[in-house]
Image (cartoon, rainbow, N blue to C red):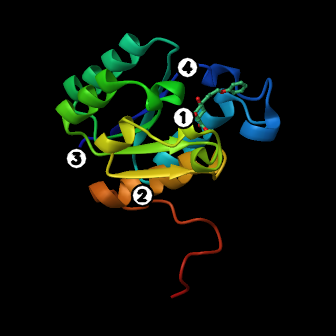
Amino acid sequence: MARTIYVLNGPNLNLLGTREPETYGHASLTDVEKLCKATAAQFGLVADCRQSNREGELIDFVHEAHANKAAGIVINAGGYSHTSIALHDALAAVKIPTVEVHISNIHARENFRHHSFTAKAAFASLCGFGIDGYRLAINGLAAKIGAKEIEPKIGTKAKA
Ligand code: CA2
């Protein structure tokens, strides 16, 4: 089974932890990427984490995921979620199981955030869980692609 998942973050998410903590929390993008790598590792997966402020580069990452036979994609396309038919088309074209994540609850915010083009190319969407949404997304993606947890958390292992 392909073991790599791509975690794609879009425009302005490199600013995480530096401003608007009331909306996006205090964690940085580095914290998000560490969380994703640790979560993926629990399922024997490797998270390849990318961020770009450019729409075309995000599309290139999606194509690269396909070329590298990635097992899945977790994407927070930021503002491009609400505008980018091209990113939707790239995700739809590669047919890689995809989960969309938003840190904030986009449905409780301005109307222009309520619609997501990229969500239409994803099998699931999560929003409003803060950065924990990435962990939840990887758990859901692992279940979808049949990746089993390989390191049960301490204290949860059944006694013989
Ligand atoms: O809630 C999310 O994850 C969003 O995708 C974040 C996007 C926003 O355009 C979407 O509607 C919802 C914006 C990311 C901006 O990130 C910042 C982080 C810290 C400080 C300033 C911006």
- Which mark is on residue 112? 1
Vertical placement of residue 126 versus 88, above or below? below
Q: Secondary structure at mark 1?
A: helix
Q: Is residue 111 above or below residue 18?
A: below
* Residue 42 visible somewhere in the drawing: no
Residue that numbered label 2 is attached to = 140
Residue 32, percent across and down? 62, 36
Q: Which residue is disc 4 drawn over? A: 11
Q: How many marks?
A: 4
Tell me the residue at 42%/57% (across/down): 140
Disc on the earlier residue, 4 or 3 = 3
Query: Can you tell which quarter of the image residue 145 is in?
Result: bottom left
Image x and y of residue 135, in percent: 55, 50
Badge 3 element:
loop
Residues at badges 3 and 1 in contact (C-beta under 8 Å)? no
> What separation in Å lies between label 4 and label 3 (alpha carbons)?
31 Å
Q: Amino acid at mark 4?
A: Pro
Q: Earlier in the sequence, mark 3 or mark 1?
A: 3
Residue under label 3, please give it.
1
